[in-house]
């Protein structure tokens, strides 16, 4: 099969969130299964010289967007069995950040059109176009017409994956004529119209041949207005073509045996001395008092409301009364940044607030911490709980979305499970399970090691999930 995978961010080239990790690790898994996979993404300013020097220029052409005819260059880089196409237009992509610009609709409408145009211009007949989130949601919509204009797309099928329903791509309806260049029938028949606005994700939900989301539990939750943010109706109507597939992680990259930058590498068979060294290094790196015995609780996350940090701040002093150390790494809403900085000054040597984004420090934390706290209100999949488990750090999560699907809770009678979990969005419940976790850590080393080992040896590879995607592609192609 010829699979064209379109995403607005792809690791290791450029990343702001979990979408980039998925776009960086699912396509190589599809390629390993014997398919020809091309990944296409914008050539942002932030994609560094090291990568650019490995690219070759393929071609340039113009892309039509309403009244515009915009320059589009395509650069190619082959890596790990996958061909990467980078879409160049400096006016749209030479910016200091990926998203959040006044013309985001235009930028990603351009990108979506460019994806379709590239298949034709570079003469690559496509079987499946796999689109991800609102930035590529126009692809299935444009394809409804472009497949008659571009022969390489004539039989292409589309899959649209929802990584997070909270970002839908909503814009004022003036973009119809000025940017999208689509006939008003696309609005009037309800494909793009949503509460008087244009909603790109809604368009993809209707126009795509198949919809997936990133965990089975989230797929269920998206029928519920609490989680679906206005999309529950349209998702309900389209549930016959929808499925939840749990993400994998890049287990070669996130391997405690080989990860560079750790105080000591370790394996699931003999994690103890390695983790001890990594814990000491973590405590030193983030200003926690060196102490091998005290449990270190870690959070690595965007500090956004739906990540559930209000549950942590509500009971912060009671958590600290458990005799633990806490390290938080991430940036986000001012309210949480401030609360964690305050905690750092009130609990010197015991609470560390690292208000920044750092991949290197996150690895030091995954490897060195004892517990990984993820109290998300909603979590489509979540990758960091899986990474933490790979590194023998036991997760404490709320039972939602992919957290529920990847962290079976500890059963004190059988010793089974991979972590601790609580059901309700309730800080008392969080405190209760965290207390149980800390108690087990102190009192039952054997049970603790078993939990660590279950997480470290769990299968978080893409092998199974890639197969589920391939089944969908195959089914669509008949
Ligand atoms: C989004 C979701 C996260 C998921 C990731 C990759 O960032 O919020 O839960 O793991 O996409 O699918």
Image (tube, grey):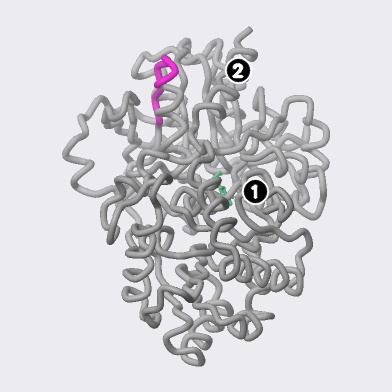
Q: Residue furthest left?
A: 53
Would you name the residue on which mark 1 appears?
A: 417
State the residue at coordinates (36%, 79%).
290
Would you name the residue on which mark 2 appears?
A: 471
User: Where does residue 314 sit, x and y in percent of width and height?
Assistant: 68, 80
Question: Which of the 4 image quarters holds residue 83?
Answer: top left
Relative to 316, say whether 423 is above or below.
above
* The residue stretch that appears in magenta: 32-39
Note whether residue 107 is visible.
Answer: yes
State the residue at coordinates (70%, 44%).
218
State the residue at coordinates (52%, 70%).
297
Was residue 224 drawn as part of the magenta stretch in this picture?
Answer: no
For the residue pair 189 and 347, the one nearer the viewer reads as 347
**N-term mark: 1 or 2:** 1
Marks 1 and 2, Cα distance to the nearest angstrom? Answer: 29 Å
Was residue 34 drawn as part of the magenta stretch in this picture?
Answer: yes
Note whether residue 173 is visible.
Answer: no
Element on which disc 1 rests: loop
Q: Residue furthest top?
A: 478
């Amino acid at each position: 099969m010829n699979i064209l995978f379109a995403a607005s961010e792809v690791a290791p080239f450029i990343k702001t969130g979990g979408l980039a990790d998925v776009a960086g690790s699912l396509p190589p898994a599809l390629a390993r299964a014997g398919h020809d996979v091309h990944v296409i993404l914008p050539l942002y300013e932030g994609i560094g010289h090291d990568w650019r020097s490995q690219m070759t220029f393929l071609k340039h052409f113009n892309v039509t967007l309403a009244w515009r005819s915009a320059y589009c260059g395509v650069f190619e880089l082959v890596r790990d069995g996958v061909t990467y196409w980078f879409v160049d237009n400096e006016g749209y992509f030479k910016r200091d950040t990926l998203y959040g610009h006044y013309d985001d609709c235009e930028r990603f409408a351009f990108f979506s059109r460019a994806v379709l145009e590239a298949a034709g211009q570079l003469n690559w007949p496509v079987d499946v176009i796999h689109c991800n989130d609102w930035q590529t949601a126009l692809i299935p919509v444009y394809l409804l017409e472009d497949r008659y204009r571009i022969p390489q797309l004539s039989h292409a099928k589309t899959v649209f994956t929802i990584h997070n329903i909270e970002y839908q791509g909503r814009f004022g309806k003036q973009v119809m004529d000025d940017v999208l260049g689509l006939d008003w029938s696309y609005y009037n028949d309800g494909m793009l119209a949503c509460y008087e606005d244009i909603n790109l994700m809604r368009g993809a939900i209707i126009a795509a041949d198949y919809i997936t989301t990133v965990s089975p539990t989230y797929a269920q939750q998206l029928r519920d207005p609490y989680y679906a943010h206005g999309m529950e109706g349209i998702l309900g109507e389209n549930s016959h073509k929808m499925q939840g597939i749990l993400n994998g992680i890049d287990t070669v990259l996130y391997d405690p045996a080989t990860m560079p930058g750790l105080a000591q590498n370790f394996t699931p068979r003999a994690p103890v001395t390695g983790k001890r060294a990594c814990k000491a290094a973590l405590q030193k790196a983030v200003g926690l008092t060196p102490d091998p015995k005290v449990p270190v609780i870690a959070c690595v996350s965007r500090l956004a409301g739906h990540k559930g940090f209000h549950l942590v701040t509500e009971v912060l002093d009671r958590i600290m009364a458990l005799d633990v150390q806490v390290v938080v790494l991430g940036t986000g809403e001012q309210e949480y940044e401030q609360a964690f900085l305050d905690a750092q000054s009130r609990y010197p040597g015991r609470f560390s607030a690292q208000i920044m984004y750092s991949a290197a420090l996150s690895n030091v934390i995954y490897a060195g911490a004892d517990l990984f706290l993820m109290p998300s209100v909603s979590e489509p999949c979540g990758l960091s709980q899986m990474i933490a488990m790979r590194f023998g750090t036991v997760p404490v999560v709320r039972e939602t979305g992919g957290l529920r699907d990847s962290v079976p809770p500890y059963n004190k009678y059988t010793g089974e499970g991979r972590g601790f979990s609580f059901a309700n969005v309730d800080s008392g419940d969080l405190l209760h399970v965290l207390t149980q976790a800390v108690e087990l850590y102190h009192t039952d080393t054997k049970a603790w090691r078993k939990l660590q080992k279950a997480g470290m040896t769990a299968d978080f590879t893409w092998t199974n999930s890639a197969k589920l995607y391939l089944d969908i592609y195959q089914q669509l192609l008949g």
